[in-house]
Amino acid sequence: MKRSISFSVNGDTVQVEVHPHWNLLRVLREELELTGAKQGCGEGECGACTVLVNGLPINSCIYPIMEVEGKDVLTIEGLASRDGALHPVQEAFLEKAGVQCGFCTPGMIMSAKALLDANPDPDEEEIRQALAGNMCRCTGYIQIIESVKHAAALLSSIEQEA
Amino acid sequence: MRTFDYFKPVCVEEALFLLNKFADKSKLVAGGTDVMVQWKKRIISPVALISLRNIPELNFIRMNDCLEIGSATTHRSLELSADIKSKFPAIYDAVSNIGSVQVRNSATIGGNLCNAAPSADSAPPMLVLDTGVNIVSSDGQRSIPIDQFFKGPGKTVVQPNEVVKSFSIATPPENTGMAYWKHTRRSAMDLPILGVAVLLSFDEDIKTCVKARIGLSVVAPTPIRARKAEEFLLGNVVNEASLDEAGKIAASECSPRTTIRGSDWYRREMARVLVKRVGLISTERASHFSKLES
């Protein structure tokens, strides 16, 4: 039997009819048409489905939808401002070529965003730890790590201007 | 359609009521990083999932005379606790290297232990800390030492009508060092080929061992203590030679299997090597702590 649950996605409150066995990723992609988060392994190994729930990165492919009730979900679609201006982490990934095929990118960026929210000036080891759960089969990770370092610099310069 | 109903009790009493109501047709779920995958792979098909995520009395880290950890505390909360890192570094070593940040934000220490994988990372540190497991049912409470908790792969002493509530750990005596080493092929997102935790307490000169605990995973159907190696170290001067011998004894206490991650002889050999190495790290940490305290 379907249940009705309500939660916030990228700042908007949504009400969705769900089967209790659905996971968050399915609801984002199939019900809410937010297809930024990707289904990779479906088992919490690859990180392509990473979104933030109450600010913390989780694997949405194994996150029970019934646990999302009343919580705040942030997906890659919610990062850019409403006028279309990219978030500094997105800018940094473009500038440092941290994107190749793009499949892992939404998850990478959400993990990077969560890291930089908690730790604005991470060292390389901390970046590698934070991204350990996001697999990339194209880049060899070097440009991705450079992108996160650049994002930290961009965010700190914005901070200083403000 | 294959589905389940999902219940979100807000107190232990309510969880126990649901557990009694649905009995063997239900499954407890905390972070879901094991349970949701088992459901997807059709290993389990419960009628009701009973979530322990929304019960505040299961989610806490309390440090008074002893350390108490709620069973539904995430690995990430433990990893970020300054007290855990400074006072119980073997727990930190284990919980900071389980899965990814995403997994650690969901997965709980109670879930890791109740899932009872022979490779459970949190098991060896909890074994060397003589952890008490506090279990509750509608009939009352009981506490059992963690070395009696595991019964086999995926099996524990927890009965179908019971919930693991918390873990109690006594503060180790002065001059104690502890560490956990997860032996893996890659440094992240891997299961251990072997897991080794060592806790050593010393007399004041940080030489003679007054307490020894060695916890091993993936060397037997359950995580185990290497009791003969512990007995050998007790009262002995701890140095490279005695830890070498302790490693040999510990290896003889192992009965590992050959699996995709490693063969039996390799696991036994690495148990010998790693008991020594982790013993040296523990000794170094004990001497570091004693300098900090003096």
Image (cartoon, coloured by chain):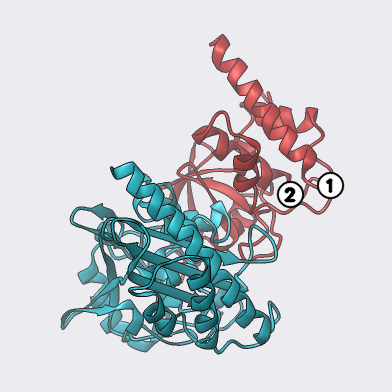
Please tell me whether residue A6 is drawn above or below residue B271 in the rendered image. Answer: above
Colour applied to chain A: red
Dot 2: element: loop
Q: Which amino acid does label 2 sit on?
A: Cys
Residue furthest left as drawn:
B140
Direction from residue B129 to residue A77 in the image, left or right: right
Q: Which chain carries label 2?
A: A
Colour applied to chain B: cyan
**Residue closest to the eye, A105 or B224:** B224
Instruction: Report which quarter residue B263 is drawn in.
Output: bottom right
Disc 1 to disc 2: CB gap under 8 Å: yes
Direction from residue A144 to residue B124 in the image, left or right: left
Q: How many marks?
A: 2
Task: State the residue position of label 2.
Answer: A104
Residue B115, percent from left and from top: 46, 77
Please tell me whether residue A159 is drawn above or below residue A77 in the rendered image. Answer: above
Are discs 1 and 2 located on one and the same chain?
Answer: yes
The residue that appears at 71% across and 60% down in the rendered structure is A40
Residue B72, percent from left and from top: 35, 63
Can see residue B37?
A: yes
Please tell me whether residue A37 is drawn above or below residue B214 in the rendered image. Answer: above
The residue that appears at 57% across and 29% down in the rendered structure is A121
Q: What residue type is labelled 1?
A: Cys
Residue furthest top as drawn:
A161
